[in-house]
Amino acid sequence: MIKVLIADDIPILRQGLEAILRLESDIDVVGLAADGEEAFRLACELSPDVVLMDMRMPVHDGEYGTKKIKEIHPEIKVLILTTFDDEENVSKAMSGGADGYLLKEMDNAAVVSAVRMAASGMSVFGSSAAAAIQRKFGKKPAPEGIYRRQDGVNLSERELDILRLITDGCDNKEISARLYLAEGTVRNNISRMLEKLDLKDRTQLAVYAVKNDLV
């Protein structure tokens, strides 16, 4: 069971996320917090696997809560879930040790998938956050807190081409047309990549591509 703590200063958003996650049989929402300080206190008390942390909250914000949690409990995964993807906020989250940075505009299934990925040890960054990280840090080594999956898996050029188009949001028919491949060939390549990388779906493939600078 994945234990999740939700930190957001807006009650209806906290409750909405709680309702979404409670529909999943493998996820248990163990606590709700209204600011970074309360998130830290509850994280120490409840030992969640994943914290969904809003960035901008009154009194003690998400940057504060993330830093405090990661300083004392580095094993707890902190996912920033916010409406802001500017470089300043992304940089603050990364410097605090966040394990992921997502926007609230994500659909419910993507949020659930992100929680599972974080709990399994993967970091999750939306494409806009990844772009902000690249602008901020350029070609420098990734700052502490950005996890890159080092699994030694080799992807073929065809698989890489398909992976990049998946990240662009293309479906199998569009990929087939762009690469002049049969749809069955596209499906087979995607299945092989999922097996090679031990991933579950196209969303996880897209996240993998962004994290590993394949797009």
Image: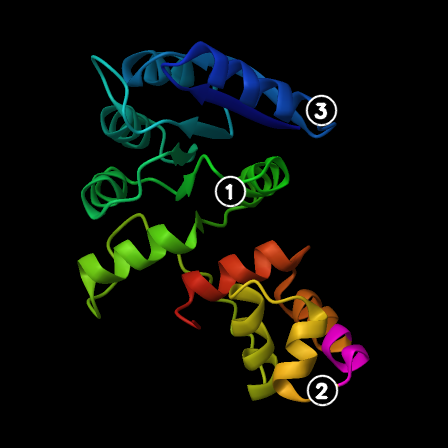
Marks 2 and 3, the one that precedes in the sequence: 3
Identify the secondary structure beneath mark 1. Answer: helix
Q: Is residue 129 above or below residue 97?
A: below
Say if residue 198 shows up in the picture.
yes
Q: Which residue is mark 2?
A: 181
The residue lying at 77 percent from left, 84 percent from top is 182
Identify the secondary structure beneath mark 2. Answer: loop
Magenta-drawn stretch contains 138: no
* Circle 3 residues within 10 Å: few <14, some 14–19, many ≥20: few
Q: Quadrant of residue 90?
A: top left
In the rendered structure, the answer to whether residue 141 lies left or right of residue 168 reads left
How far across and down, in percent of the image, does residue 149 sit?
46, 61
* Marks 2 & 3, CB-CB < 8 Å contact: no
Identify the secondary structure beneath mark 3. Answer: loop
Mark 2–mark 3 Cα distance, whole angstroms, equals 39 Å
Disc 1 vs disc 2: which is toward the camera?
Answer: 2
Amino acid of disc 3: Leu
Q: Residue furthest right?
A: 184
Magenta segment boundaries in residue numbering: 182-187
Marks 1 and 2, the one that precedes in the sequence: 1
Q: Coloring scheme of the render?
A: rainbow
Q: Which residue is mark 3?
A: 23
Q: Quadrant of residue 184?
A: bottom right
How far across and down, in percent of the image, does residue 23 sit?
71, 24
Disc 1 vs disc 3: which is toward the camera?
Answer: 3
Q: Quadrant of the C terminus?
A: bottom left
Q: Which residue is mark 1?
A: 118
* Circle 1 residues within 10 Å: few <14, some 14–19, many ≥20: many
> How many badges with numbers are in the image?
3
Amino acid of disc 2: Leu
